[in-house]
Image (cartoon, rainbow, N blue to C red):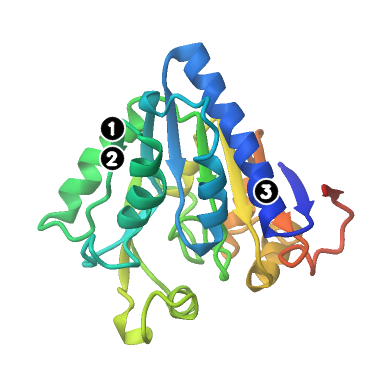
Amino acid sequence: MVLKVFHDRSSLAKAAAQKAAVAIRSAIRDRGQARVIAATGTSQFEFLAALTEPADIDWGRVELFHLDEYIGLPASHPASFRKILLERLVNKAGIAEFHPLDGDAHDVSDVIRQVGTALASAPVDIAFVGVGENGHLAFNDPPADFETEEPYLIVNLDEACRRQQVGEGWFGDLSQVPKQAISMSIRQIMRAKEILAVVPDSRKAQAVKACFEGEISPMAPASILRTHANASVYLDHESASLLSSTLETSA
C-alpha cells in the first residue's frame, strides 16, 4: 500500500482522477472493458468531477458497481448513493452499464443476490473507496467482518457513522438517518486488482492515523488496505495531520 499526501483537496482530487483514468483506459485497452467500483459521499465529489473531465475515456465500455446504499431510502432522497452516482458519474460520463443497489426495493435480499452475482462474475479492475470518520470501509463499521465471502451484506450502522451523515448535512438529525444499509463486503473490496482511496479533510485525520499507523484490525476497518498489493491512499495535509511517519508528499 502507498500513502500520498497532497497540498489540498483539489490537488488530491486531480491526482487521484489521473491515476483512476490510467487504470480505466488500460483495462479497456487490454480487455475491451473496465469493471469499476465507486464510492460516494462528500469526500468523493471533487474526485468524481475531475474523473469525468477527460475526453479520452470510453465510458461506454465501463461497467460500474457501487459500494453501499441505505436501506429504506428512496432514490429521490439527496443522500441516496445511487442518486449521487447517477448524477455525478453515470449520466454525466455516459456509463453504459450500471448496477444500482436499490435499498428501497421490496426484497432487498434479491437485490443483493442479483448485483452480487454480477459483481463476482469477473475481476474488478479498480475500486474507488473512502474512509469514514470511524474508519469504516464502505459501510463496514467497526468491528468489521473480515471473513465473509459474500459480495454484499446487510449491515447495522453504528451511531458514529450515522452522526457523520448528519454532520455532512444529508439529514436534519440522527432520527432521520437509516439504521441499516447494503454494503460491499471487505473481502469483495479487497479482490479488486487495484484500490484507490480518496480521503481528504481534517474530520478523517483520527481515522487515518488509526487505520494506517495502528493495528490492522476489524476495529479499524480500512486498515485492511495495508495488506493489498496495489492499494493507494491519497490524503490531503488535513487528513494526514496526525500521522507521525514521513510520507511521500506531492504538490
Mark 2–mark 3 CB contact (< 8 Å): no
Q: Secondary structure at mark 3?
A: strand
Foreground of the two, 208 or 83: 83
> Residue 96 at x, y = what percent?
30, 30
**Among all residues in the image, which is located at the extreme right?**
246
Q: Are marks 1 and 2 in contact (CB under 8 Å)?
A: yes
The mark that comes first in sequence, 2 or 3, is: 2
Q: Position of residue 76 (x, y in %)?
A: 23, 63
Closest to the observer: 232 or 75? 75
How far is mark 1 from mark 2, CA to CA?
8 Å
Q: Is residue 182 visible?
A: no
Q: Amino acid at mark 1?
A: Ala
Q: Is residue 206 visible?
A: yes
Q: Which residue is mark 3?
A: 233
Distance of label 1 from label 3 (alpha carbons): 27 Å
Residue drawn at x 21%, y 67% as measured from the top left: 72
Which residue occupies the foreground of this view, 121 or 201?
A: 201
Q: Closer to the N terminus: mark 1 or mark 2?
A: 2
| Residue 39 drawn at (x, y percent) | 46, 51
* Kind of residue at badge 2: His
Disc 1 designates what residue? 118
**What is the distance, in whole Å, between disc 2 and disc 3 at their CAs?**
25 Å
Query: In what element is the residue under mark 1?
Result: helix
Residue 156, compared with residue 75, is above or below; it is below
Residue 105, x across and y down, in percent? 14, 56
